[in-house]
């Protein structure tokens, strides 16, 4: 268990140190309805950088350009982050409700397998790209109810 915590902390530290291209100043524009390329849905993080994850992240992208992210990273409790997102061509960007931008933009690839299951892969637009694969899911109501908006300043935002 101790090794798992150390590994998780090390991975999140590496993620926090990576840099992204600077987003242009100005407000994030909400997506244009009909131009969402299947992103509007509820998603659960399945793999991160081609490895199974030792933490939980759920994201709900809404048609009005808002998102809710429920993450259980560095904590036993789920933490709720909300904000807005924009999808331009196939690049996803966003801002949290406190005005802080996501760490970087993400190239989006959504696929549907023969059984109709959707998968969304986000490729970070960094010098060393990291891929995050999300499975289409329904976010459990217990997680939504448990998630708190009050959080420590030390909690690292996943996106």
Image (tube, rainbow, N blue to C red):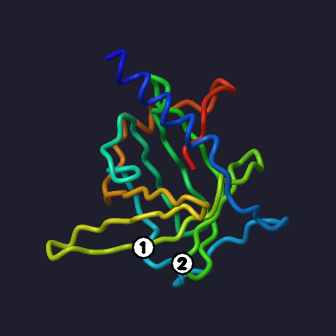
Secondary element at tag 1? strand
Name the residue rendered at 38%, 73% in the picture. Answer: 110
Comparing 136 with 90, the one in front is 90
Q: In x, y percent, where is residue 129?
A: 52, 60
Outermost residue on the left side: it is 115
Comparing 55 with 81, the one in front is 55
Count of marks overlaid on the render = 2
Circle 2 Cα neighbour tier, 10 Å, few/some/many (<14 / 14–19 / ≥20): some
Q: Is residue 73 left or right of residue 113?
A: right
- Picture quadrant of residue 149: top right
Residue 109 disc label: 1
Q: Is residue 137 left or right of residue 33?
A: left
Outermost residue on the top side: it is 2
Name the residue rendered at 69%, 55% in the picture. Answer: 95
Location of mark 2 (residue): 90
Circle 1 Cα neighbour tier, 10 Å, few/some/many (<14 / 14–19 / ≥20): some
Query: Does label 1 or label 2 sit earlier along the sequence?
Result: 2
Image position of 39 with respect to 16: above or below: below
Image position of 56 with respect to 42: above or below: above
Q: In x, y percent, where is residue 153?
A: 69, 27
Q: In x, y percent, where is residue 146?
A: 45, 29
Q: Are marks 1 and 2 in contact (CB under 8 Å)?
A: yes
Q: In x, y percent, where is residue 132?
A: 42, 56
Outermost residue on the right side: it is 25
Secondary element at tag 2? loop
Name the residue rendered at 43%, 43% in the picture. Answer: 57
Q: Is residue 57 left or right of residue 140?
A: right
Name the residue rendered at 48%, 41% in the picture. Answer: 70
Residue 124 disc label: none
Tell me the quarter of the image containing the N terminus.
top left
Image position of 116 with respect to 155: above or below: below
Tell me the distance, in whole angstroms, between the alpha carbons under discs 1 and 2. Answer: 8 Å
């Amino acid at each position: 268990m101790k090794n798992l915590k150390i590994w998780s902390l090390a991975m999140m530290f590496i993620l926090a140190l990576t840099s992204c291209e600077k987003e242009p100043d100005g407000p994030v524009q909400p997506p244009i309805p009909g131009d969402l390329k299947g992103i509007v849905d509820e998603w659960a993080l399945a793999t991160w950088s081609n490895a199974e994850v030792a933490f939980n992240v759920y994201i709900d992208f809404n048609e009005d350009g808002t998102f809710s992210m429920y993450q259980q990273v560095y904590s036993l409790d789920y933490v709720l982050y909300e904000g807005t997102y924009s999808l331009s061509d196939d690049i996803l960007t966003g801002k949290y409700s406190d005005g802080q931008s996501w760490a970087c933009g993400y190239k989006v690839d959504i696929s549907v397998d023969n059984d109709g299951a959707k998968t969304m892969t986000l490729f970070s637009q960094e010098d060393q790209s990291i891929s995050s694969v999300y499975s289409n899911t329904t976010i459990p109501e217990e997680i939504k109810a448990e998630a708190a908006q009050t959080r420590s300043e030390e909690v690292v935002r996943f996106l």
